Image (cartoon, helix red, strand yellow):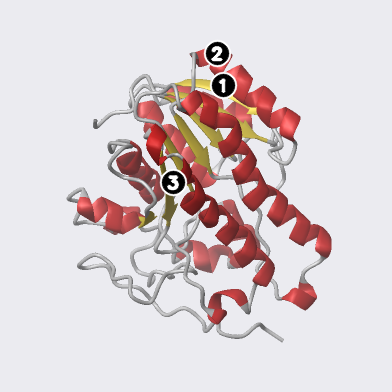
Amino acid sequence: MSTLKGKTLFITGGSRGIGLAIARRAARDGANIAIAAKTTTPQPKLEGTIFTAAEEIEAAGGRALPLACDIRDEDQVLAAVAATVKEFGGIDICINNASAISLTPVQATEMKRFDLMMAINTRGTFLVSKSCIPHLKKASNPHILMLSPPLDMRTKWFAPSTAYTIAKYGMSMCVLGLAGELKADAIAVNALWPRTTIATAAVGNLLGGEAMIRASRKPEIVADAAHAILARPAREFTGQFCIDDSVLAAEGVTDFEPYRVDPSVPLMPDIFLPEDDVPPPGVVLGERPALDRPPK
C-alpha cells in the first residue's frame, strides 16, 4: 500500500507543527482527518487553530473534521472519537502527537507543569489509544503511531529534564505494551522521532528561538516518514522505534537538503537519540550542548 486514500486518521494536537504536517501529507492522498486539539481561537505566539488546520487539510485534497478536545478529559476524548466514527464511518489510524514540554531540572519544575506533561504525554496517549482501539480492530491495515523517542535509559537524558523525559518515555512505553497486546489483532503500534530539532512553535518559543529554528529541519520530514510507516503492512511492521530520516532512507530517499530550514547552519541533533544510531549517508549533524547534568 502506498496511499492513504480513503483512510481516516485521528490526530491529536494537529492544529499546527508536526501534527498538521502529517495531516496535510495524508490529505494529499485523499484521506479523512479528524483534528483533535484545544486551540479554537488564534493565540499570540501560536499560529493555527483546529479550524485553520481543517482549511489546510481540505485545500490539500482531504476531508477534515475539526474537534475541540482536551485529551486530559476522558469524556471529551470519547466524544471526539465518536464524532469521527459518525462522520467518516470508522478510524484506521491513530496519531498520538499532542505533547507538553518543559526542559527543566527537578527543582525548577513546578508540580502543575509535571502534572500537565504526565496528563497530556503519557496519560493522554494511553487514553486516546485505548479509545480508538475498538474502531481500529474493525479497520483494514490499522496503525497507532506515537511521536515519541527511542527508549535509551541513560542519565544524560534524565538529569536535565527528569519530568519531561519520564512523560515522553511514558508514550514510548505505551508503544511496547500496545504492540504486544494488539499484535494478534494486526494493529501496528510504532514510534517516530526526529533526528534533528524541528521548526515548530515549541522550538521557536520555548527552546532556542530563531537560531534553533535555522538549525532545524522542516516538519515535512516527519510527515513524510510518518506516511511511509502508515503505508506499511500493519501485520509486518510493529513495535518499532523509528528515526525520521532513517525511515525515508529505507524508502530510497538520498537527498535530505530540501528539508533544512537554512542549509548554511549546522543541523541541531534532537535529544534522546541513541549513541549507536547512525545517520543516513551524507547527513552531517552539528554539535549539541552537553546534557549530562542539569543547569545550575
**SS at badge 1:** strand
Residue under pointer 3: 179
Indicate the position of residue 253 as horizontal and vertical percent values: 20, 52
The answer to whether any part of residue 15 appears in the image is no
Residue under pointer 1: 65
Residue 222 shown left or right of residue 3 in the figure: right
Query: Which circle, 1 or 3, is nearer the viewer?
Result: 3
Query: Which circle, 2 or 1, is nearer the viewer?
Result: 2
Residue 111, labelled with which disc? none
Residue under pointer 2: 87
Q: Amino acid at mark 1?
A: Leu
Mark 1 Cα within 10 Å, few/some/many (few <14, many 20+)?
many
What is the spatial separation of the Cα atoms under label 1 and label 3, in whole angstroms? 28 Å
Query: Which circle, 2 or 3, is nearer the viewer?
Result: 3
Q: Tell me if residue 162 comes above or below residue 36 in the rendering.
A: below
Depth check: 168 or 110 in front?
A: 168
Which comes sooner in the sequence, label 2 or label 3? 2
Q: Is label 2 in contact with label 1 (beta carbons under 8 Å)?
A: yes
